[in-house]
Amino acid sequence: MSSYRAAVCTELTGPDSIQIQTREARPLASGEVRIAVKAAGLNFPDLLMTQGKYQFRPDPPFIPGLEAAGEVLEVASDVQSVKPGDRVMAGGKGGALAEQWIVGDSAVSPLPAALSFAEGACWQTAASTAWHALVERGHLQPGETILILGASGGVGMAAVKMAKHIGATVIGTGSNEEKLEAIHHAGADHLIDSADQNLATKVKALTDGKGVNVVYDPVGGDLALTATRAIAWNGRYLIVGFASGTIPAFPANHIMIKTYSVIGVRAGEGPRRDPELAIRQRAALRDLADKGIMRPHISHRFSLTDAAQSLGVLERREAIGRVVVEMTTSS
Ligand SMILES: NC(=O)c1ccc[n+]([C@@H]2O[C@H](COP(=O)([O-])OP(=O)(O)OC[C@H]3O[C@@H](n4cnc5c(N)ncnc54)[C@H](OP(=O)(O)O)[C@@H]3O)[C@@H](O)[C@H]2O)c1
């Protein structure tokens, strides 16, 4: 059994507690697949987990990382879906920031030919969140308008690309020129600085005074309350996350007066609770991946030894699109 290197969170004090440690590989249990990780994609929850602030709160020491791409090294004797040598992507509740990752076979899918290992490592979480929010929960239609907050982030940029694929007009917010440029490059039709005091007025001006049909919000905080002033009559407000660190309280009277719906989005839990939705979501995402739609933009690439620095990029709000940790074998 071989040993491998892993980025280990040793205390819930943030990225600085990450240490690179050598682990001994364990034998596979029934239904498990061992992957030689080539690249791991970072997500905001990875940062929150190192701070003990995420809804799923593992005790240290633990290996962060929710998604990766690589090659299958070994499968348990009862696994039929993949075989050693297959190029795959995988998702789980942690463990991807390592040279080897053991996951259940249902968490593994073939790496689409259109995606590199680094792109595949960044694809699943952001793409499934954008698809689940816009299609399944938001019912976004061609010709509608959507305001995407935090549009330079992982789930934000995937939503920009998905909304354009659907045929909507996209207004994206970002906090600096470089981010706004990237959001424009991703396909957004209109850009607004997230700190703009006239954000709601500008959205109204872009929508003939009506406001947007849909708001996609992975940010929360004060920006969320501003965005409710930019929503149309009968609009849909999609609650995706709280990257700002502040959970907004929506005034019920405002929701009634403007008759908009506030809709929760849980891209992972939804399909876990509804097997038919799981089949629908998997098929839709496979088709989108094969077509290269929502191909991730990667702003930062790190080696495993620099895993702490990679999480620091998310912490300092420097990422545009995605941050990837790429493995080079230690021996
Ligand atoms: N509901 C679901 O199923 C689901 C699935 C995946 C992720 N999420 C959630 O979605 C949120 C975004 O995740 P992500 O992976 O896209 O994160 P990300 O790549 O770091 O993007 C977050 C974006 O939010 C904006 N932002 C505003 N205030 C911020 C702050 N104080 N700190 C950091 N960013 C801030 C940033 O853009 P600007 O600098 O331009 O403002 C940034 O681009 C997280 O809360 C995550 O937990 C939810």
Image (cartoon, helix red, strand yellow):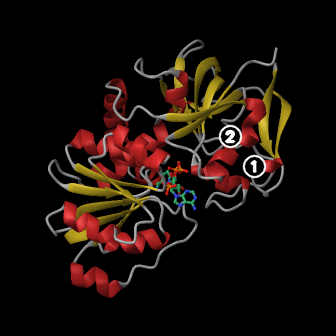
Which of the 4 quarters of the picture holds residue 36?
top right
Amino acid type at mark 2? Ser
Query: Can you identify the residue that label 2 sits on?
Result: 310
Q: Position of residue 232 (x, y in %)?
A: 21, 69
Q: Residue furthest front?
A: 177
- Give the quadrant of residue 2: top right
The answer to whether the residue bearing label 2 lies less than 8 angstroms from the nearest atom of ligand 1 is no
Task: Identify whether 36 is placed above or below 172.
Answer: above
The structure residue drawn at horizontal position 78% and vertical position 57%, both measured from the top left corner, is 12
Q: Which kind of residue does numbered mark 1 sit on?
A: Pro
Residue closer to the observer: 283 or 254? 254
Relative image position of residue 202 (x, y in whole percent): 27, 65
Report which residue position mark 1 lands on. Answer: 15
* Mark linked to residue 124: none
The extreme bottom residue here reads: 253
The residue carrying pointer 1 sits among few (fewer than 14), some (14 to 19) or many (20 or more) residues within 10 Å by Cα, namely many
- Residue under the point 54% across and 60% down: 243
Left or right relative to 319: residue 283 = left
Percent of width and height locating residue 282: 37, 36
Comes first in the chain, label 1 or label 2: 1
Left or right: residue 172 compared with residue 74:
left
Q: Mark 2, residues whose alpha carbon is within 10 Å: few (<14), some, or many (≥20)?
A: many
Asked whether residue 288 is in view, the answer is yes
Circle 2: element type: helix
- Decide if residue 230 is in sight here: no
Gap in angstroms between the C-alphas marked 1 and 2: 8 Å
Instruction: Indicate left or right for 49 with 296 as reference.
Output: right
Do the residues bearing badges 1 and 2 touch, measured as CB atoms within 8 Å? Answer: yes
- Left or right for 213, reference 34: left
Q: Give 213 or 73, whichever is nearer the viewer.
A: 213
